[in-house]
Image (cartoon, grey):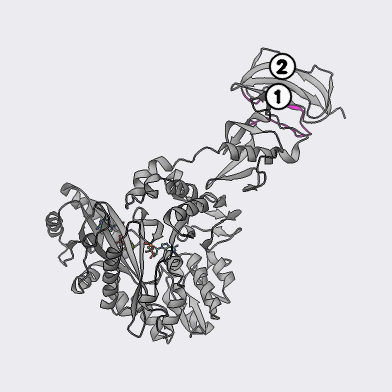
Amino acid sequence: MIQSLLIANRGEIACRIIRTARAMGIRTVAVYSDADAKALHVRQADEAVHIGASPARESYLVGEKIIAAAKATGAAAIHPGYGFLSENAEFAKAVIDAGIVWVGPKPDSIRAMGLKDAAKARMIAAGVPVTPGYLGEDQAPERLAAEAAAIGYPVLVKAVAGGGGKGMRRVDDPADFADALASCQREAASSFGNTDVLIEKYILSPRHIEVQVFGDTHGNVVHLFERDCSLQRRHQKVIEEAPAPGMDPDTREAICAAAVRAARAVDYVGAGTIEFIADASDGLRADRIWFMEMNTRLQVEHPVTEEITGVDLVEWQLRVASGEALPKRQDELSINGWAMEARLYAEDPASGFLPSIGVLQHFSLRTMRVETGVGAGDEISPFYDPMIAKLVVHAPCRGDAISDLQGACSTADVWPVKTNAGFLARLLDRVEFRDGMIDTGFIAAHQEALIEKPMLSAEAADAAYNILVGPQRDCMPLFRSGFRLNAASQTEVILAVDGAPRRFDVSEPFSPLADYGARAFQGRDSLVKFDSGYAYRVELYHPRGTATGTAADGAILSPMPGRIIAVDVAAGDTVTKGQKLVTLEAMKMEHSLTAPFDGTIAEVNAEIGGQVQEGVVLVRLDTGA
Ligand code: ADP
Ligand code: ADP
Ligand code: MG
């Protein structure tokens, strides 16, 4: 067994690999860029080596620096994680040539599967069904257009070197083909430095089904069943599960066998994934599932397979890389229960899924299994992938797994970085998803209804209000109205939620029913209340310019346009802190303005029945000092 391991990656996957390596007694070496100097993977590893500036091109993608770091620290092996250099055959070869163990497949296997067209050709030869399409070398636009017509629209134009959902264009109408091709080639040139494309039949009702395979150096290859990764946004996986809903044993047997054939065809060693596309218009059927591509590495969503099989895939990787045989035979592997994973992204669904960066002042995840590369206080930098955590659940059945994951997303409390947690929680609530009616268009079809941030719930508003007024009960906030609803303990108040005023019925402070303190965070200038995967900034509402409760300032301003319905004091009166001064009616509510401190009334500028504008000084109070 290898004694030391350098992890050529960052974020959650680096932390994931370190965890298993440590459990196996293997010394771990992290590498890091400028931006990651204090990152969690650096803190967790036994040693860490700085490899360059923040952009991945200058650090995590520079093979020579990583190999030099391994040599400098005496690391016996290199694990590439996913992304970055993990599917770079030249890097794998350079590692091996440097006398270091490569935790991954042979460079030739990576190469064979690296380009989508060559991989498909190879799969056809191995008897694996592939998506119908054109794989030819002739890349003349006229030829490609003719092939597209022969395949039949809709078609998908794919960069042969593509990955991460990039370099793909669906074309429905022959008239759009030339433009789509040109734009696909432009993206392929800038992202992958290779303009070659292939053309595929666009599968309707598509479901992404993939099979985890594992090979060793003794000629064994097994599969660890399938995952369903159909919930995607822009061809990027968002929620993954295992097993696949609606998969019958015969279909499973057929595609898993095809996956093992595919792996054997490239002499595969280590962890790999065979991705298939299924036409699910009539359920999952073996004759409607086709090979799409192979990912020659550990996959982002590997934890769902670990949960249903009880296998630690990273441990298997390290054992296989050390020359051991696979720890289990095929007949010793089985599916236990249902697992589901959600990718938590630092992004704001409400603003077009814009990535969100910044320091995680609050970061609290309550899930049975969390894979993350950050902790509270860490910074989300703009340099890398916006995925900040994976929430993983395992339950006896799919319904329970969905409920658990929904709960996990609803209680993912993050501030001030925005996340897709609330969006995911609502997505998981869709009855169609619960019914297993999924395909890769599911998110796009439901997105419109789910991207708006919902209003703070009544319960959360109640809790927020009680937290806000709790500690300062003596200096009652200006806008507790005296208006009472049927329930004796209810009060109507205005809270500024994310800066905008809203009316809420809340319970009296310290109602034994309210869950104060729970799932809230006192930010720098306001309370942050977490609710169903969203974070809300909540303040007692007072319009700009209103000075309330500050002992130095006795100007009591009108909080909003309204009508004066009570004036309880006159100039010269002495009042005590909290005493009611003037009552205003606005937005169908009464707002009693109270004395922010003990003092003497210097001036009253309000008459019963009078209309007042926002920001008008209604009462002036002197400290009397
Ligand atoms: P997978 O196929 O493992 O599920 P995806 O298809 O979602 O991964 O993403 C494809 C590629 O996008 C990955 O191989 C990787 O290059 C990149 N990627 C995705 N997530 C991350 C991440 N958190 N960090 C770095 N790269 C990532
Ligand atoms: P990448 O290398 O970017 O992961 P893939 O070939 O794996 O590219 O495709 C990514 C996603 O695009 C798939 O998960 C699927 O949602 C969609 N897709 C790919 N090929 C097809 C197809 N022929 N028909 C319909 N959807 C497809
Ligand atoms: Mg893929």
Q: In the rendered view of the protein, which quadrant contains the C terminus?
A: top right
Majority secondary structure of the magenta segment?
loop
Residue 143 sits in quarter: bottom left
Ligand 3 resides in the quarter of the picture at: bottom left
Based on the picture, tell me whether residue 55 belongs to the magenta stretch.
no
Q: CA distance from mark 2 to mark 1?
A: 9 Å
- The one nearer the camera, 602 or 441, is 441
Q: Is residue 272 above or below residue 622?
A: below
For label 1, the SS is strand
Location of residue 176 in the rendering, given as x and y in whole percent from the top left corner: 19, 48
Q: Amino acid at mark 1?
A: Ser
Which residue in the protein does label 1 denote? 592
Image: magenta residue range: 542-560
Disc nearer the start of the sequence (2/1): 2
Which residue in the protein does label 2 denote? 566
Cβ of mark 1 under 8 Å from ligand 1: the answer is no
Q: Is residue 27 above or below residue 133?
A: below
Q: Is residue 471 above or below residue 86?
A: above
Q: Amino acid at mark 2?
A: Ala
Decide if residue 130 is on the left or right side of residue 309.
left
